[in-house]
Amino acid sequence: MTEILATRELSKSFGGLAAVSGVSLAVEQGQVHCLIGPNGAGKSTLFKLIVGTYPPSAGAVLFRGEDVTAARPFQRVRRGMSIKMQQPSIFRELPVRQNLHIALQYHADRGQMGEEEERLLELLGLAAAAETPAGTLSHGQQQWLEIGMALALKPALLLLDEPTAGLSPEETERTGDLILRLAREGMTVLVVEHDMAFVRQVAQQVTVLHLGRVFARGSVAEITADPRVAEIYLGK
Ligand code: ADP
Ligand code: MG
């Protein structure tokens, strides 16, 4: 198996707070890898180090065989990374289709944009809502649109930070189905998630972060059977 992404002893401090400490992570090409851990564990910060929002205090990020630690975020996007942040990034006043159109401008050929819009609308289950202002969609639909905007960049590695936050169990399962479909088409997905049912549905590999460090890693079965993992969620 080939690693598409690796972090080497990656660290980030904010003043005196070590949000991420010495994290070495390997994501295999074509897998769905879930990053879990209690609130404040450093998951979102790790994502921001991977995509280049923050420079690390120490360590390195390797992507598709290249050291991208010094690369700007747009350069990482060009090499095939795309992220859905925890904070919303859709244009609420604009119709769904227009949101996708804007995201597609970064990558698609002019001649193919219409086709790509339709393909994404279908994939996301948003075809009937294409002309609806994004801000009036249900919360679940807004999350799918966010994922679609990240997908518009045609990434090799899709990073999703809490894509199921606030979703119903049905919407969560649909999000899982979408991720599994993307994985079948060959995409690698790294996802921060809280919902263990969702992790069971999609993950091939799980990394547990706690207090900025890798606390455990393994398959879903290994992680869910580990009593130490249950303890950190109970705050012990
Ligand atoms: P998670 O996503 O796992 O909940 P975060 O990565 O958001 O955790 O945060 C990890 C720790 O770093 C938290 O203690 C948080 O308060 C702190 N932190 C995150 N971002 C910043 C920032 N920009 N400035 C200062 N502290 C931050
Ligand atoms: Mg977070």
Image: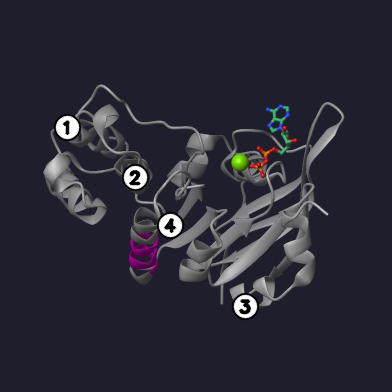
Q: Which residue is mark 4?
A: 156
Q: Which residue is mark 1?
A: 132
Left/right of residue 74 with respect to residue 1 in the rendered view? left
Question: Residues under labels 2 and 3: Cα distance?
Answer: 28 Å
Please say if 196 is above or below 100. Answer: below
Q: Earlier in the sequence, mark 1 or mark 3?
A: 1
Dot 2 alpha-carbon crowd within 10 angstroms: few under 14, some 14 to 19, many 20 or more? many
Q: Amino acid at mark 1?
A: Thr
Residue 70 in picture, x, y percent from top left: 65, 39
Residue 216 in picture, x, y percent from top left: 75, 65
Judge by depth and name the residue closer to the eye, 228 or 177: 228
Q: Which range of residues does the magenta coloring cover?
A: 176-183
Q: Which residue is mark 2?
A: 140
Dot 1 alpha-carbon crowd within 10 angstroms: few under 14, some 14 to 19, many 20 or more? some
Name the residue at the top extreme.
93
Left/right of residue 204 with respect to residue 153 in the rendered view? right
Residue at coordinates 83% horizontally, 54% vertically from top-left?
236
Q: Earlier in the sequence, mark 1 or mark 4?
A: 1
Q: Is residue 106 on the magenta stretch?
A: no
Question: Residues under labels 1 and 3: Cα distance?
Answer: 41 Å
Residue 147 in picture, x, y percent from top left: 37, 46
